[in-house]
Amino acid sequence: MTEIKGLLAGQILLCYMNMDERELNVTSLARTLGVDKYAVSRALSRMEKEGLVNKNNPRKPILTTTGWERAKRFNEKMNIAMSFLMENGGVYKGIDEDAISMALALSDEVLKRMIGQRKALTKKAIDRDVIEGYSLQKYFEDGTYMTDISLIDIKRRTKKTGSGRSYIKLSAGRGMIYVDTTIFESTKAYKANSKPIKIKYTSSHGESNYEVMRMGKVIYFPVDEVQFACFNDIRILLGDIIMEIGKEKMILQMIVRYM
């Protein structure tokens, strides 16, 4: 079985899982990962030898069937590793690299045990169609839970960018949502500014804008501000919140899957 070798190879596979297909070229990968194009090209060549990448078009390499299988498996390991690190050490600079290194080292047996622990989410059945963010701890144990996020144009209601990384951390009666700011890079405000810009949110109750808190490239705000629709038949919570990135307003949509 082909395994994933090296930090950069793991980062590239995560890009294939999370970036817009149109952006999957050597230049964009290098820019996203903060490395030079030569490093990406060398990594892709090694991945081609390992059967993970097809480089028939050198400018736009694609994953093989085996590559996609490894990417999905690695993405799952990465999510579990990130949840574990956040739950035990919080958000800190370099957590992404640590999670990737941990995911590269995880055996299938350890992964199965961690998945088994991660599925024990609910304290009791969710018996309503809508719950407020401050009510999550009535239903969920303390812990860190992955969410899938999308950024949506508030006027056209169309998806603005691909999936991003987000976590909900519940602890001692409080809950916070952590979001990787990479998801905002497609907005006009981010493209026009090289320095960090102000990001604000409006609560689901329509209250005034509040500026998010920051920790490196991660922003965070209270889960209390979000209202979640409950789809109990498919075990999904769907929440959204209005974000103001510079002067541009977008909807940040969150999906929480539970057992």
Image (tube, rainbow, N blue to C red):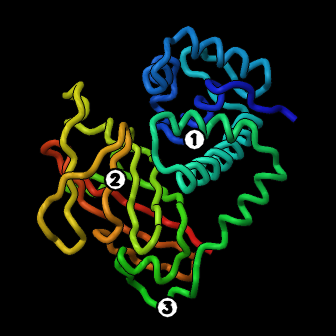
Q: Earlier in the sequence, mark 2 or mark 3?
A: 3
Secondary element under disc 1, as helix, strand or loop, is helix
Comparing marks 2 and 3, which lies closer to the viewer?
Answer: 2
Where in the figure is residue 159, as x and y percent of width and height? 36, 51
Q: Which residue position holds label 1?
A: 17
Q: Helix or strand or loop: what does disc 2 sit on?
A: strand
- In the rendered image, residue 187, in percent from the top left (x then y), is placed at 26, 39
Q: Residues within 10 Å of mark 1 (few under 14, many from 20)?
A: some
Type of residue at label 1? Met
Badge number at residue 220: 2
Q: Earlier in the sequence, mark 3 or mark 1?
A: 1
The image quarter in which residue 240 lies: bottom left
Q: CA distance from mark 2 to mark 3?
A: 28 Å
At a point 33% along the width and 74% down the height, the residue shown is: 227
The residue that appears at 35% across and 67% down in the rendered structure is 223
Q: Nearer the viewer, residue 78 or 230?
A: 78
Image-quadrant location for residue 233:
bottom right
Residue 161 screen position, x and y as percent: 38, 44
Which mark identifies residue 1? none
Instruction: Assess disc 2: are there few (<14), some (14-19) or many (≥20) residues with their C-alpha within 10 Å of its C-alpha.
Output: some
Q: Give the foreground label among 3 and 1.
A: 3
Residue at image point 62% right, 33% down:
13
| Distance between the alpha carbons at the discs numbered 3 and 1 | 34 Å
Q: Residue 209, relative to residue 188: is it above or below?
A: below
Q: Secondary structure at mark 3?
A: loop
Q: Which mark is residue 127?
A: 3
At label 2, which amino acid type do we have? Tyr
Amino acid type shown at disc 3 = Asp
